[in-house]
Amino acid sequence: MLSFQPLPATDPAHRPPPRFADRAHAMVPSETRALFSMAARDDVVSLAGGMPSPDALPVAALGAVLGDVIAAEGASALQYGSAQGDPQLREQVCAVMAAEGVEASPDDVLVTMGSQQALDLVTRVFVNPGDSVVTEGPTYVTALSTFAAHQARVVEVAMDAHGVVPQALADTFALLAAEGRPAAFYYTVPTFQNPTGRVLGAERRREVVEVCRRAGVLIVEDNPYGLLHFDAEPQRALCADAPEGVVYLGSFSKTLAPGLRVGWVRAPRTVTGKLVLAAESAMLSHSQLAQRAVSRFLTTTSWRGHIDAARALYRDRRDAMLAELAATMPDGVSWTVPAGGFFVWLTLPEGVDARAMLPRAVEGGVAYVPGTGFHTRGGERHLRLSYSYPSVSRVGEGVRRLSDVVRAETAR
Ligand code: PMP
């Protein structure tokens, strides 16, 4: 018979380190996360985080809606629900996507905790450790963390002013196939991209869909900013023209409130089925309360009117940023002109490194995200500016401070 001696009490300082799984070693804090604490100082204008403006959050209306949900739906709103998500909300999500030309059925939709969770589930379902995921270069920083957490190998494809270059995409797919490591999927933010603010042009959209179809590569279209367009009509989603070849990720974070954590994924039916199973194991069921609140908000308030007001607010801030950049940046600096969304991508003069400059910028009272965070390698001459959170006057002040820092840097 086995007998166990009580272990001597160990000094916590001498405990062996936790034996993390391989995938945990790839989980490291992103530069953006580390920046949030630094940029939170009152004397620093943060052009770093991509958060919605507090002025664009419908606080009173959501408060009323949440009260109504509890009053009218009581216990059922506080109960577990299905892993696929509230049926009524899934129907409403289909109507939201229709604005971008997508024809979907509620059966094709899974509600998620923001599009971030959708991205995690899609990666979980499609990527084995060591598989290649192809992305635009630069791309959304937390997508890179998600891919790293699933031990994917990220392969970047160059962009120009009109988005990803289709020939470069085709070449990359061919190269990976020849290496025997075909891409698991192509991840793209085609509209008002984070971090560049760029839009993939209409002709390019057709080309990208065709390149992926020919190569047999699934497209993961991440579109949290599409409805925040300043000038023209909303862009047609890639998913609208290739529903069988595209997994579409949507979110209410930028058009309603990120704190609700309500997003969704629309996929071909067989893929949705698998994603629902992945969601079940990840979270059992989504917050019924949050889903019902969004659903009721969409039926009882003018959501479109709310988005129109948010578009006007962000357009003013974008205009303030562009005007101040034009008025104050020294020669040799260039930037993108976004037609929607939250971001401007800035290119510094040759020899100026955005990451090295950051401590001096914070000293000078302004924060941004260095371009290196959005690439697997490179990006030193770039930085991302966001105009979504600070007021118009703070946006102007932040850009003036940044211009002074860049001018000092070029004189170093
Ligand atoms: N994708 C992109 C491109 C984003 O910019 C963000 C938010 N910054 C997300 C996904 C995640 O958004 P959500 O709040 O819906 O999880």
Image (cartoon, rainbow, N blue to C red):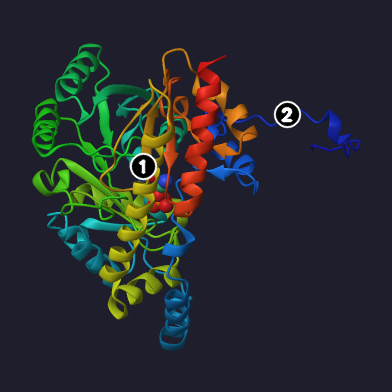
Q: Position of residue 85 (x, y in %)?
A: 34, 64
Q: Which residue lies furthest to the right in this view?
A: 8
Quadrant of residue 39 within the rendered picture: top right
Number of marks: 2
* Secondary element type, mark 2: loop
Snapshot quadrant of residue 103? bottom left
Q: Is residue 378 left or right of residue 227?
A: right
Percent position of residue 227, x then y: 25, 55
- In the foreground, 303 or 12: 303
Residue corresponding to mark 2: 17
Can you give x and y, in whole percent of width and height, for residue 70 in the image?
A: 47, 83
Q: Nearer the viewer, residue 49 or 44?
A: 44
Asked if residue 116 can be seen in this view, the reply is no
Name the residue located 39 percent from the left edge and 51 percent from the top edge: 317
Point out the image quarter for the N terminus: top right
- In three-dimensional space, the C-alpha distance between marks 2 and 1, rounded to whole angstroms, equals 53 Å
- Name which residue type carries label 1: Ala
Left or right of 356 on screen, residue 289: left
Amino acid type at circle 2 is: Pro
- For the residues bearing labels 2 and 1, Cβ distance under 8 angstroms: no
Say whether mark 2 is within 8 Å of ligand 1: no
- Vertical comparison of 86 with 311: above or below: below
Left or right of 151, for residue 224: left
Residue 25: x, y in percent? 56, 27
Judge from the rendering whether residue 407 lies leftward or rightward of residue 339; answer left or right. right
Question: Which of these two is toward me, 411 or 121?
Answer: 411
368 shown above or below 406: below
Residue at the disc numbered 1: 323
Residue lying farthest front?
327
